[in-house]
């Protein structure tokens, strides 16, 4: 008999053998059977739990093929999130309130996940506004991998003064007198941003454990059941994996994690991998926590950061020699690997290295190109030729306006060319690259894939580079499973696969495109166990301890996944017209002069605002 039966739902199984079913049976953490309600109910025994989905859409659990959960979990309880915040005024209010809660010497941190184009004012907060909101508590605000905004208290805490030199690869903005303004600029690399953030206080171990549990619960709230963790700068193995291993050993993981090992030391990347090959191997661990291979950083000389506010970086001439030694080591030991690659010019050089290695030591396992925003059709063919896949993320949803301004609308139409990748039958996975640039919210990505629009509503793609809802869901489930070698175990609601699934708050397959971004899960299950429940399903989920420390934003501010007004029109926050002006926008909640009076990163305002289809911006 089944352990659990879920019935009365609209099931999207993604199983070609049974795409539309009426009920699902679960046994020993796996999908036991799917089919007609009468057939599945015949598996009901006296101990079987029957869950009524209430007519809601049921999907396989989402799988983020490129994120940074392990690092993000260590910091989640310290971070103020601005996702879905409708205005600069609201963001500054949240900043002010968190500064009042935060004790010395801790900082207030807003670390990625937001775009100025989400705000009614269509601009970033100024340094003056940030200093007014938090005059005494250090504040660090990361904007993409482009810049960080620090208040005066943070400059003092970090010891950044008039005499502090610019670090390699970064710029400390200064006023006319040479004093630091508080703006740190990644030019051309993000090292200045990483290294500054790393100087902030860390949470004690027990709070890191609590923080990681709350981060996983937030992902469960958004229907995520699996991720592939791409390591990250400052994420050292094995010491920085202590918390996630501890949670695994206590059977407290609520997200399946396959993790990659990220080379940490510039100039010593090969020795990093030689050491790790002696310590572990791909597949080591369990179905909840397993080692997945190398990357996304294989060598620092190959890093082509995706800052579209700056020109494309040229990689060092020594890159090929450094990369070839590492890739040959990995291929010889049959380690899968992934590499960060934004631009086609970089991808072309990487693939030439891979092809040379493959001639000497044929690849026996998968390799992954991460991001691939401007990859060409020729290089997609080269990826396919010897067993590679492409992990895509919704970074253009956050940076599309900047890309259009630098490279033009035509270039943006196929950035990245996901529809072409699928047409050419290359393995494609979807993800977020959270948490430092884009949001961890998968529904922003699904909205972007289906609508072709940025977070700010700017259309990027025509129909030839947008996906059907089923195709978008498939790369977020079945597609992503390939990237950890688990395509036979997860990604569909089919017999024998993991019972990882979500019951959604709204019907993803039929709601208007703009409402996709409002979707959450009302019940999420991993391995047949309910890990998140809301409303009618709340009693099915285990309780979570209160967030710690006591000043954590998580305990005081609704998370992005909890914010009920995720896509509600913001109230009107600014009127610069005289009282008789009738041009305020009822849809976006702002006055047209905000658009006219604030800098927008495009050359042609009329064409830009016209693309949004909003008459309030007619010029």
Image (cartoon, grey):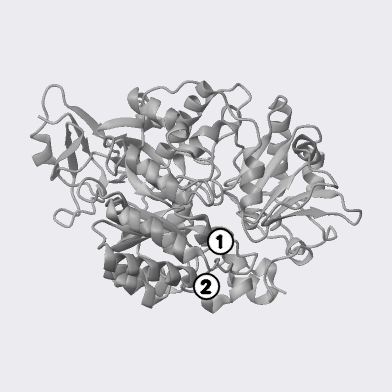
Residue positioned 52% across, 52% down in the render:
267
Quarter of the picture containing the C terminus is bottom right
Place of residue 448 in the rendered image (x, y in percent of width and height, measured from the top left): 47, 60
Q: Residue furthest right?
A: 177
Residue 186 lies, in percent from the top left, at: 66, 56
Q: Residues within 10 Å of mark 1 (few under 14, many from 20)?
A: many
Circle 2 is placed at which residue position? 412
Give me the residue at 53% from left, 59% from top.
Answer: 301
Q: Is residue 113 above or below residue 353?
A: above
Looking at this view, is 431 or 250 the one in front?
A: 250
Q: Is residue 36 visible?
A: yes
As rendered, which of 274 and 549 lies closer to the eye?
274
Disc 1 secondary structure class:
loop
Residue matched to label 1 = 306
Q: Position of residue 540 (x, y in %)?
A: 33, 26
Q: Is residue 610 visible?
A: no
In depth, the one of 338 and 317 nearer the eye is 317
- Could you tell which of marks 2 and 1 lies nearer the N-terminus? 1
Residue at 59 percent of width and 71 percent of height: 404
Residue that appears at 39% across and 67% down? 353
Q: Is residue 467 left or right of residue 9?
A: right
In-front residue for pair 607/589: 607
**Tag nearer the camera, 2 or 1:** 1
- Few, some or many residues within 10 Å of mark 2 (<14, 14–19, 20+): many
Report x, y in % for residue 29: 21, 33
Q: In this rendering, would 592 be left or right of 347?
A: right
**Quick one: quadrant of the N terminus?**
top left
- Is 85 on the left or on the right of 249, as rendered? right
């Amino acid at each position: 008999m089944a352990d659990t039966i879920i019935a009365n739902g609209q099931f999207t199984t993604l199983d070609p053998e049974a795409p539309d079913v009426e009920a699902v049976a679960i046994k020993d953490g796996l999908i036991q059977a799917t089919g007609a309600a009468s057939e599945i109910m015949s598996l009901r025994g006296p101990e079987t739990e029957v869950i009524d989905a209430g007519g809601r859409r049921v999907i396989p659990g989402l799988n983020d093929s490129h994120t940074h959960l392990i690092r993000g979990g260590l910091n989640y309880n310290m971070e103020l999130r601005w996702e879905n915040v409708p205005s600069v005024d609201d963001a500054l209010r949240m900043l002010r309130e968190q500064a009042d809660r935060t004790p010395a010497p801790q900082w207030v941190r807003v670390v990625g996940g937001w775009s100025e184009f989400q705000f009614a004012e269509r601009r970033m907060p100024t340094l003056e506004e940030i200093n007014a909101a938090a005059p005494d508590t250090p504040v660090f605000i990361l904007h993409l991998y482009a810049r960080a905004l620090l208040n005066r208290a943070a400059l003092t805490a970090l010891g950044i003064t008039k005499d502090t030199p610019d670090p390699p690869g970064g710029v400390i903005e200064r006023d006319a007198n040479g004093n630091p303004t508080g703006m740190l600029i990644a030019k051309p690399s993000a090292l200045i941003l990483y290294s500054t953030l790393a100087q902030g206080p860390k949470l004690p171990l027990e709070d890191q454990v609590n923080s990681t549990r709350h981060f996983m619960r937030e992902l469960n709230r958004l229907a995520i059941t699996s991720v592939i963790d791409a390591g990250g700068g400052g994420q050292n193995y094995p010491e920085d994996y202590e918390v996630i291993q501890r949670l695994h050993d206590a059977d407290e993981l609520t997200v399946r994690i396959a993790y990659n090992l990220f080379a940490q030391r510039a100039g010593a990347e090969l020795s990093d991998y030689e050491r790790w090959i002696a310590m572990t191997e791909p597949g080591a661990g369990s179905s909840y926590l397993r080692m997945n291979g190398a990357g996304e950083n294989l060598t620092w000389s190959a890093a082509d950061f995706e800052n579209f506010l700056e020109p494309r970086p040229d990689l060092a001439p020594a890159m090929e020699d450094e990369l070839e030694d590492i890739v040959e080591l990995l291929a010889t030991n049959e380690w899968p690997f992934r590499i960060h690659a934004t631009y086609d010019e970089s991808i072309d050089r990487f693939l030439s290295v891979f092809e040379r290695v493959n001639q000497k030591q044929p690849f026996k396992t998968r390799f992954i190109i991460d991001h691939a925003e401007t990859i060409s059709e020729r290089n997609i063919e080269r990826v396919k030729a010897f067993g590679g896949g492409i992990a895509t993320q919704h970074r253009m949803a956050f940076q599309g306006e900047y890309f259009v301004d630098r490279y033009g609308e035509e270039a943006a139409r196929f950035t990245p060319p996901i529809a072409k990748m699928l047409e050419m039958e290359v393995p494609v996975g979807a993800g977020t690259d959270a948490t430092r640039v884009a949001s961890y919210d998968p529904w922003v990505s699904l909205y972007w894939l289906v609508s072709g629009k940025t977070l700010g509503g700017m259309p990027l793609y025509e129909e030839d580079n947008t996906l059907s809802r089923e195709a978008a869901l498939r790369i977020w489930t079945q597609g992503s499973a390939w990237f950890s070698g688990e395509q036979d175990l997860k990604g569909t609601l089919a017999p024998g696969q993991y019972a990882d699934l979500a019951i959604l708050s709204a019907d993803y397959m039929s709601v208007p495109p703009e409402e996709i971004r409002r979707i959450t899960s009302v019940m999420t299950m991993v391995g047949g166990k309910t890990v998140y429940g809301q409303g009618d399903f709340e009693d099915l989920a285990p309780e979570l301890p209160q967030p710690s420390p006591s000043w954590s934003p998580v305990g005081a501010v609704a998370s992005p996944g909890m914010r009920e007004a995720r896509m509600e029109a913001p109230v009107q926050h600014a009127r610069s017209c005289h009282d008789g002006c009738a041009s305020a926008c009822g849809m976006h909640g702002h006055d047209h002069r905000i658009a006219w009076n604030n800098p927008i990163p495009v050359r042609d305002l009329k064409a830009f605002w016209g693309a949004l289809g909003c008459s309030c911006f007619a010029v």
